Amino acid sequence: MTELNDDVRQEPLEVPAEPAPTGDELLEHTRSMVGYHYTVDDYYEVGREEVRKHATAVQAAHPVHWSEAAAAEMGHDTLVAHPTYVSVLGIIAQRKLFEEVVTGYDLWQIMQSDQRLVYHRPMKVGDQLICDVSLDAFRRITKPADAEAGTGPEVIDLMVTKNVIWNQHDEPVMTTWTSLAARPGLQVPPELEASLDHVMMKIDKTGVPGKTVFREGGRYELPDPTERPAAYAAVSFDTLEKGQELPPKTFRISRGNLANYAGVAADPNPIHFSDHVIEASGGMDDVVAHGMQTMGLGATYVSEFIGDPSAFCEYNVRFTSPVYVPADTCAELEFTGKIKSLDPETRRGTIALVAKQDGRKIFGRANVVVQFN
């Protein structure tokens, strides 16, 4: 079971749904949903150009995402998706979970606090991905009042969602755990509701794909997959030393990067692009980068060092501070890394990442486990 994180992140804005459940009703309903699971009705097919679009969004120039010939030289039969490509299909499953299962929360209320990705095999072009979704854990905490800040007690709901992702050959591809923090009962002042409406994405109607996934029952009682990917073209284990440092690298993010990532990930939350929403929320200094966008940059950084991103075995991050992106300049994210441990029996190693903006850490913990040659 994934550990829930008590840390409070940035202050999201909520546009309440109608009718809104009471706090006790929401608490009891969500508690009752722990262990609830379902399989998506429609598979997600990984496309060649979608892999490239996502690679662009996380500034990844590694050839396995771009060139079939280069990918073949590294032992792959087609283009391989970036290690954080799962964010593209994950948001679809998460949205369904909160719209149809864990109801009563508005997506504005929910902020990502931790992400753990366990890799079983590379995600690649042509994969038809089927996602098993469940609510893995839930609890409610009350943070005490802060007299100096002039704030009263604050209720926070902490939950973990779990996705097990399979391909069309019934092979496990990835298992993910996402820790979320929600503040139930947040209200937007009535005088702001109308003015905020103009920044929300408008869709008249969407098509209905129908059911394409037909699976037998009982899958949720099975143990989690344990397969791990091969080393592929990763660097040799024998060339590495414990404590070895990765060359530092700085990524720049503009408002254009935020807009592009929002489109690629199909995440229209205006905290990532609207100054108006930020001003109305009162809890953030500026528009913010997506958590998975910053995690993606970290994976890009590690990929350049290890030689082949397909050798990722696990990637976990705790988000501790938002990345603010001002309108008049770029945000700069500085990444450094160090080999934390090496296991000669498995020839795997763990790389610890540090990511900072203006000297402020944006990850509380960030580790990548890699299968080396």
Image (tube, grey):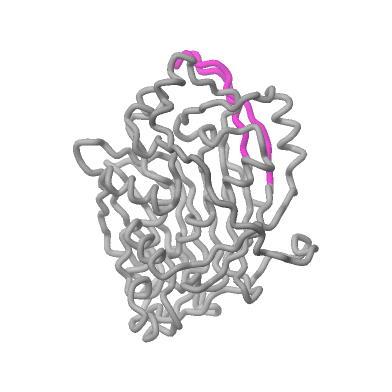
Residue at x 49% of width, y 40% of height: 204
Q: Is residue 165 in view from this perspective?
A: yes
Residue 307 versus residue 189 in the image, above or below? below
125, 305: nearer the viewer: 125
> Can you say which quadrant of the picture contains the C terminus?
bottom left
Residue 274 versus residue 306 in the image, above or below? above
Measuring from the top left, give residue 210's x and y in whole percent. 64, 57
In the image, which residues are magenta? 137-158
Number of marks drawn: 0
Q: Is residue 342 in view from this perspective?
A: no
Residue at x 55% of width, y 16% of height: 152
Q: Is residue 306 left or right of residue 37?
A: left
Q: Is residue 344 left or right of residue 359?
A: right
Residue 296 among those drawn in magenta: no
Q: Quadrant of residue 66?
A: bottom left
Residue at x 41% of width, y 25% of height: 196
Residue 46 versus residue 361 in the image, above or below? below
Measuring from the top left, give residue 232's x and y in whole percent. 45, 81
Measuring from the top left, give residue 170's x and y in whole percent. 66, 73
Residue 138 among those drawn in magenta: yes
214, 113: nearer the viewer: 214
